Image (tube, grey):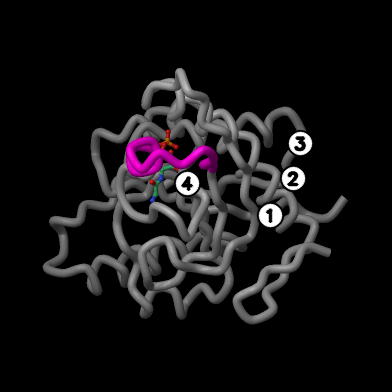
């Protein structure tokens, strides 16, 4: 087996996707190692999950700098110190600028709780639910400087049932997120993902 893929996970909140990645590594379904978990929110439950799993973790305080470019520089520096292969956004709620992304070409991915390009941005589940679409889901994509606009790597469809509530729908999407994200990261670990313009191919 090849060496484990070195991951940095960026998380602003609850960290359930972080947990799914940790569990997939622990059960041998994902050949990766989380080298650091970074949060921009001191109270993020993701940091507690990292601590509970004895993973290196830091709170990188946005108040330390005066603008988002400076924050990006600080963040890039921390990540580079660890020598990572893939930067995994898991409920990361800050936009990353082009300056940051240029330092990690094709190495930053995100998960979003809708079938992009539908319903980008905040509260994607609610947007889909209120729009009345019959199918929604989740998307893993490369990150570019737009809001949820990067090349799509993989998607999972979730049908919306007539008796769904926003809560039940959100829960079902999250279950699929927890399956899809570790699977996609494993494909990176096997070197099977490559970009062909906006299209992402899986070997
Ligand atoms: C997840 O549903 C993720 O898809 C979403 O935030 C939640 C984080 O949950 N991300 C976005 O909306 C990004 N645009 P988690 O902290 O429990 O993983």
Residue assigned mark 4:
114
Can you tell me whether the CB of the residue at mark 2 lies under 8 Å from the nearest atom of ligand 1?
Answer: no
Secondary structure, mark 3, is loop
Is residue 97 or residue 1 the one in the foreground?
A: 97
Residue 29, numbered circle: 3
**Disc 4 to disc 1, C-alpha distance:** 27 Å
Residue at 37% x, 78% y is 98
Mark 2 or mark 4: name the one nearer the start of the chain: 2
Residue at 66% x, 73% y is 199
Residue assigned mark 1:
5
Mark 2 and mark 1 in contact? Answer it, CB < 8 Å: yes
**Disc 3 to disc 2, C-alpha distance:** 7 Å
Q: Quadrant of residue 123?
A: top left
Task: State yes or no: residue 105 in magenta.
Answer: no
Residue assigned mark 2:
31
Q: Is residue 101 above or below residue 153?
A: below
Mark 3 or mark 4: name the one nearer the start of the chain: 3
- In the picture as drawn, the residue positioned furthest to the top comes out as 163
Please indicate, yes or no, whether residue 2 appears anywhere in the rendered image: yes
**Count of marks overlaid on the render:** 4
Q: Residues within 10 Å of mark 3 (few under 14, many from 20)?
A: few
Residue at 46% x, 34% y is 50
């Amino acid at each position: 087996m090849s060496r484990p893929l070195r991951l940095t996970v960026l998380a602003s909140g609850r960290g359930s996707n972080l947990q799914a990645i940790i569990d997939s590594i622990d059960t041998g379904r994902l050949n990766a190692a989380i080298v650091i978990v970074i949060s921009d929110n001191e109270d993020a439950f993701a940091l507690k999950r990292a601590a509970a799993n004895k993973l290196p973790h830091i709170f990188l305080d946005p108040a330390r700098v005066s603008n988002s470019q400076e924050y990006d520089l600080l963040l890039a520096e921390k990540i580079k110190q660890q020598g990572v292969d893939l930067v995994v956004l898991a409920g990361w709620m800050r936009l990353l600028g082009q300056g940051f992304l240029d330092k990690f070409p094709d190495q930053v991915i995100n998960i979003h709780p809708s079938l992009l390009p539908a319903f980008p941005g905040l509260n994607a589940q609610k947007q889909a639910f209120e729009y009345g679409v019959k199918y929604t889901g989740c998307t893993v994509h490369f990150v570019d400087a737009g809001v949820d606009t990067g090349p799509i790597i993989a998607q999972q469809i979730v049908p919306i049932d007539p008796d769904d509530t926003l809560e039940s729908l959100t829960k079902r999407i999250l279950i699929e997120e927890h399956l899809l994200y570790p699977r996609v990261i494993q494909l990176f670990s096997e070197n099977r993902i490559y970009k062909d313009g906006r299209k992402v191919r899986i070997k």
